[in-house]
Image (spheres, grey):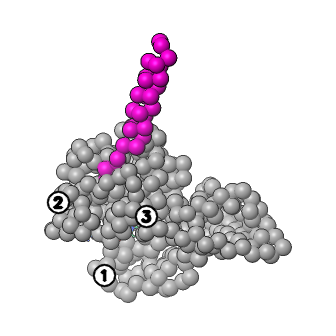
C-alpha cells in the first residue's frame, strides 16, 4: 500500500472512530415526578446527549413535563417509549416497586438503563435486573448519584490513598421530618414506603463504598409506624478486623445528615454526605484541611456522564457502581427488613 493511501485509510478509521465515540446519546425518561425534573435539568447542562422523550402514566403529566423541558416527544405509556428507535438510554424515575419491571421492559427492548435508587425492592429483583443487562449485552447502573459528585470522588481518592490510614469506623445518618400523611408515598406500604429504601439506602451504600465489602454481621432496630412502614431505623454493621459502621435513617426526626469516617491516622467529616459540597480532613498531629468542591446544576448529571462514558466504551456496568454491589446492597436491606419482619405486598404475593 502506498504511503498516501495508508494515510487516507488511517484518517478514515480515525474519523469513523471519532464519530462513533462522539455519537449523540438520546435519553428517554420513564416517570415524570420530582426526581425526573431534577435529572432533566441536570442533563440539559451536558454535551453529547439529548433528552428526546418522556413517558408518564399520569394524565397530562408527560405533556407538561415535555413542554417544561423542551422535550420533542411525550408518551402516555412506558411501552411506546422503550420501543422508540431513537432512544439509546432510559432513565427510570418511577417509584421503587416499579424499578425492576420498568428496567426489564427497557432492557428487553434494547435500551441501556440508568435506574433510580433503590435499585429494586429486594435482592432477588436486583439480581434479575443484573442478569437481564448481561444477557441483553446492555448497560445498566443504579443511579446512586452520591458516588459521582466531585467532592465524593475526591474524598474517596484521598481515603484510598491512605489519607486517614486504615478506615476503622463510619458513622452516617440521613433524616428529616415528614408530617404524617397516609397518602404520601413515604408512609405507604403498598408503594414500598419507609425510611430504609428512600433514605437508609444512602448510608448503607456509603458503607459498602467506603469499606469495599459487605458487613460480616448486622444488628438493627426499626420504629414501624401505623401504616406498617419503617419510619426510623438504626443499623450497626461489623466488618472483619474489628471495623464497624453505625448508620441511621428517619423521616421522624431532623438530623445533621453528616458522615464521619474514622481512620487509624485521622478522620473525615462530610456534611450532607449524600450530596456533599465540602468536607474536612483531620490527619495525624490534628492538622485540619478543608476541601470545598461544589457540584454544578442539580448534581444528577454526573451519574449520567458516567453512564454515557460506559456506553461509549462498550461497558455493561460502571466500575464506580457495579451491578454486583447494587445486588449486595439490596441483599443487606433484605437482611435488615428480615430483622423487623417487614415484607412489601409484592413479596407476599410471590
Ligand atoms: N437520587 C435522588 O436524589 C432521589 C431523590 C428523590 C427520589 N429518588 C428516587 O426516585 C424515585 C422517584 O421518586 P420521586 O420523589 O420522583 O417520586 P414522585 O415524584 O412521587 O413520583 C415519581 C413517579 O412515580 C409514579 N407514581 C407516583 N405516585 C404514584 C402512585 N401513587 N401510584 C403509582 N405510581 C405513582 C408517577 O409516575 P408517572 O409519571 O408515570 O405517573 C410519578 O411521576 C424513587 O424510587 C426515589 O427513591 C431519588
Span colored in magenta: 1-27
Q: CA distance from mark 1 to mark 2?
A: 27 Å
Residue neighbourhood size for the residue with mark 2, other residues' Cα within 10 Å, grouped as few (<14), some (14–19), many (≥20): some
- Real-space Cα separation, disc 2 to disc 3, in angstroms: 25 Å
Q: Position of residue 260 (x, y in %)?
A: 65, 73
Q: Residues within 10 Å of mark 3 (few under 14, many from 20)?
A: many
Q: Earlier in the sequence, mark 3 or mark 1?
A: 1
Mark sitting on residue 300: 3
SS label for mark 2: loop
- Does the residue tagged 3 have its C-beta within 8 Å of any atom of ligand 1? yes
Horizontally, residue 61 falls left or right of residue 226, namely left
Residue that mark 1 sits on: 182
Bin the neighbour count of mark 1 within 10 Å (Cα to Cα): few under 14, some 14-19, many 20 and up: few
Residue 23 counted in the magenta span: yes
Q: Residue at x 56, y 82 (%)?
A: 256
Which residue in the protein does label 2 denote? 76
Query: Separation of disc 3 and disc 1 at Cα?
Result: 29 Å
Q: Nearer the viewer, residue 56 or 27?
A: 27
- Where does residue 178 sit, x and y in percent of width and height? 40, 84
Say whether disc 1 or disc 2 marks the residue closer to the N-terminus. Answer: 2
Residue 156 appears in view: yes
| Residue 284 left/right relative to 143 | right
> Count of labels shown?
3
Which of the 4 quarters of the picture holds residue 230? Answer: bottom left
Up-down relation of residue 274 to residue 255 (above or below): above
As drawn, is 250 to the left or to the right of 65? right
For the point 47% across and 62% down, the residue is 145
Tell me the chief SS of the magenta region: helix
Q: Is residue 273 visible?
A: no
> Which of the two labelled residues, at mark 2 and mark 3, occupies the earlier sequence position?
2
Instruction: Name the residue at the front extreme.
Output: 4
Amino acid at each position: 500500500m502506498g504511503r498516501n493511501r495508508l494515510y487516507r485509510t488511517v484518517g478514515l478509521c480515525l474519523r469513523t472512530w471519532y464519530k462513533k465515540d462522539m455519537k449523540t446519546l438520546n435519553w428517554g425518561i420513564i416517570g415524570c415526578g420530582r426526581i425526573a425534573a431534577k435529572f432533566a435539568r441536570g442533563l440539559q447542562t451536558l454535551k453529547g446527549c439529548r433528552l428526546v422523550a418522556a413517558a408518564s402514566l399520569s394524565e397530562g403529566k408527560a405533556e407538561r413535563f415535555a413542554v417544561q423541558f423542551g422535550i420533542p416527544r411525550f408518551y402516555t405509556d412506558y411501552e411506546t417509549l422503550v420501543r422508540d428507535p431513537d432512544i439509546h438510554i432510559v432513565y427510570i424515575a418511577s417509584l421503587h416497586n416499579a424499578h425492576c419491571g420498568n428496567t426489564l421492559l427497557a432492557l428487553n427492548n434494547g435500551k441501556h438503563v440508568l435506574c433510580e435508587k433503590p435499585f429494586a425492592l429486594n435482592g432477588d429483583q436486583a439480581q434479575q435486573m443484573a442478569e437481564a443487562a448481561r444477557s441483553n449485552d446492555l448497560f445498566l447502573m443504579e443511579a446512586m448519584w452520591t458516588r459521582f459528585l466531585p467532592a465524593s470522588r475526591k474524598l474517596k481518592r484521598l481515603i484510598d490513598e491512605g489519607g486517614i490510614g486504615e478506615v476503622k469506623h463510619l458513622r452516617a445518618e440521613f433524616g428529616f421530618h415528614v408530617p404524617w400523611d397516609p397518602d404520601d408515598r413515604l408512609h405507604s406500604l403498598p408503594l414500598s414506603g419507609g425510611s430504609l429504601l428512600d433514605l437508609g439506602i444512602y448510608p448503607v451504600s456509603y458503607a459498602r463504598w467506603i469499606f469495599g465489602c459487605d458487613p460480616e454481621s448486622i444488628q438493627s432496630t426499626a420504629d414501624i409506624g401505623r401504616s406498617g412502614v419503617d419510619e426510623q431505623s438504626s443499623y450497626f454493621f461489623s466488618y472483619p478486623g474489628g471495623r464497624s459502621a453505625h448508620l441511621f435513617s428517619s423521616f421522624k426526626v431532623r438530623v445533621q445528615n453528616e458522615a464521619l469516617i474514622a481512620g487509624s491516622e485521622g478522620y473525615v467529616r462530610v456534611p450532607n454526605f449524600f450530596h456533599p459540597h465540602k468536607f474536612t480532613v483531620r490527619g495525624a498531629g490534628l492538622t485540619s484541611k478543608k476541601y470545598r468542591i461544589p457540584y454544578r446544576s442539580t448534581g444528577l448529571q454526573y451519574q449520567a456522564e458516567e453512564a454515557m462514558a460506559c456506553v461509549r466504551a462498550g461497558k455493561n456496568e460502571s466500575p464506580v457502581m457495579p451491578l454486583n454491589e447494587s445486588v449486595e446492597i439490596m441483599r443487606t436491606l433484605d437482611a435488615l427488613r428480615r430483622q423487623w419482619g417487614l415484607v412489601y405486598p409484592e413479596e407476599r404475593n410471590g
